[in-house]
Each structure stands twice: as structure tokens, then as C-alpha cells.
Amino acid sequence: MNKRDELIVGKAKTVYTTDDPDKMIMHFRNDTSAFDGEKIEQLDRKGMVNNRFNAFIMQKLEEAGVPTHFESILNDQESLVKRLKMLPIECVVRNIASGSLVRRLGVEDGLELNPPTFEFFLKNDDLHDPMINDYHIISFKWGTQEDIDAMKDLTFKVNDVLKKLFLDAGMLLVDYKLEFGHFKGKLYLGDEFSPDGCRLWDAETRKKLDKDRFRQGLGGVVEAYEEVAHRLGVELP
Ligand code: TYD
């Protein structure tokens, strides 16, 4: 599949059109950013690790009945995906309180949430991705009630699959963010699933194995991502 034009240059990925109008190439760069792009660094091997990790997770989700845009891995840093029409919405499920939830509600970091909680955020860097609710999505026509129901169902279904997958490998899935889009009238999981967009803690020690290592300047960022991949049995060169 030939790459054509640069379509989107995001903070960590570049998306290209291809000869097929229904397919795109996602290139995972080594760029790592936090705080709406205020902190950016190049981390060796990160693009490759995230590309392989994402492919592994997307395949697991697909097997479990979650429709995803993922088609195939093309090379170390690139994968072929369906060209979705993305909703400008981020879906977050939290099994354990951390990050913005703790800052916003003043609850204890590490508090287990039973049942897990769900939040929508608007994808808008200038506004720092504000939290929104179902009514905002309908009133501003960012999506339909059907989209809302499907996003909630699929995001919780992902939780059932991945919470167990990570726990079996000795890790706690603290929280994660998903994005969805339409392709030929159906809603698919798009974007990526990698330690850039979730929180993963060692189940015993609660050591952070995700992008919080970068946000908080803890070091060993890619080493932690590689450890997560290794524990799950993702093959890395
Ligand atoms: P959250 O705690 O709301 O924000 P922050 O990362 O600023 O502390 O994030 C919850 C989870 O969702 C966390 O694993 C990071 C992920 N996430 C993103 O990857 N991008 C986003 O734009 C948002 C809002 C969350």
C-alpha cells in the first residue's frame, strides 16, 4: 500500500492517505508529549513499541467483538487502518482514581472505583480537552444518542477485555482513553491503545508503567513501555 499525502500531523502520530480512499497509514513517531504539547521529547524506540503494542491490543479487542479500524502492521512504525470519520470526543473509563479526576474532585489517588466510572471529554487542545456530558454531545451535534450509547457500551466492553488481560500479566489498568469514528455507517474504535493513553500500574508495587513516567519526569519511559509489552508477550525486535 503506497503512502500518498500527509493528512494529519498529531502530537505522536502522523496519518497519511493511501491509494485506497478507505484506508490510511498511521505512523507512530518517537515524539512524546504531555500537558497539551507543552512538554515534548523524542524517545528512542517509542514509535516502534507503541505500533506493535497497539496492533496486539487492537487484535485482542477485535477477537473479543469490538470493531476496530486496525487492518495490519506494515513495518516497525506504521500500520494500515480504515479511514474513519472521527467524532471529536474522548471516552475515558477509570477503574482507579488518578490524574485529572483526583485534581478535579479531591479524591484520594489510588482509590478503587467500583463500579468503574466513565467520562466524556471534548477533543480541543486550545480549551485543554474540557469534560463534557451526553447533553453537550447532542446539543452541539458532536454525535447522536446512538453514538453515545455505542461509545459507552464499547468502552466498557474494552474494559472487561483489557482489565483481565493486564491483570493476568501482573498489571492494573487504572484508566484509559478511547476515540471512535464512523466507517460506512458503523462505529469503530479508532486512534490507538498504548501506554501513551492509559495508566498501568504494577499490581504488586503499583509502580507506574505508563506515560505518567514522562509527565512526572520519573525516567525509564520506554523501558516501562517495553516491560508492559514483554509481560503481555508482544514481540519486539
Ligand atoms: P486524565 O486523568 O483525565 O488526564 P491527565 O492525563 O491529564 O491526568 O486522563 C485519564 C486517562 O485518559 C489517562 O490514562 C490519560 C488518558 N487521556 C489521554 O490519553 N488523552 C486525553 O486527552 C485525555 C483527556 C485523557
Image: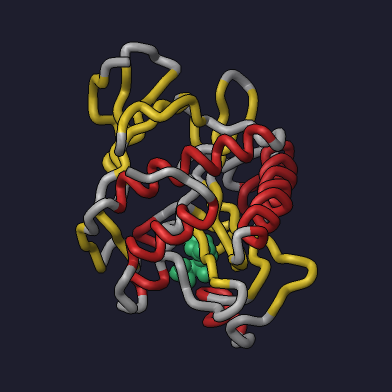
| Viewer-closest of 200 and 204 | 204
| Viewer-closest of 177 and 171 | 171
Q: Is residue 154 visible?
A: yes
* Residue situated furthest right in the rendering: 115
Q: What colour scheme governs how the chains and residues are painted in the rendered image of this protein?
A: secondary structure
Instruction: Determine whether 184 is above or below 199 in the image.
Output: above
Q: Quadrant of the C terminus?
A: top left
Tell me the residue at 33%/33% (across/down). 78
Lateral position of residue 109 relative to residue 152, left or right: left
Instruction: Determine whether 186 is above or below 59 in the image.
Output: above
Tell me the residue at 46%/53% (across/down). 229
Where is residue 133 drawn, in percent x and y?
A: 65, 58
Instruction: Determine whether 21 is above or below 186 in the image.
Output: above
Tell me the residue at 63%/33% (across/down). 62
Lateral position of residue 60 relative to residue 10, left or right: right
Tell me the residue at 49%/25% (across/down). 71
| Viewer-closest of 99 and 77 | 77
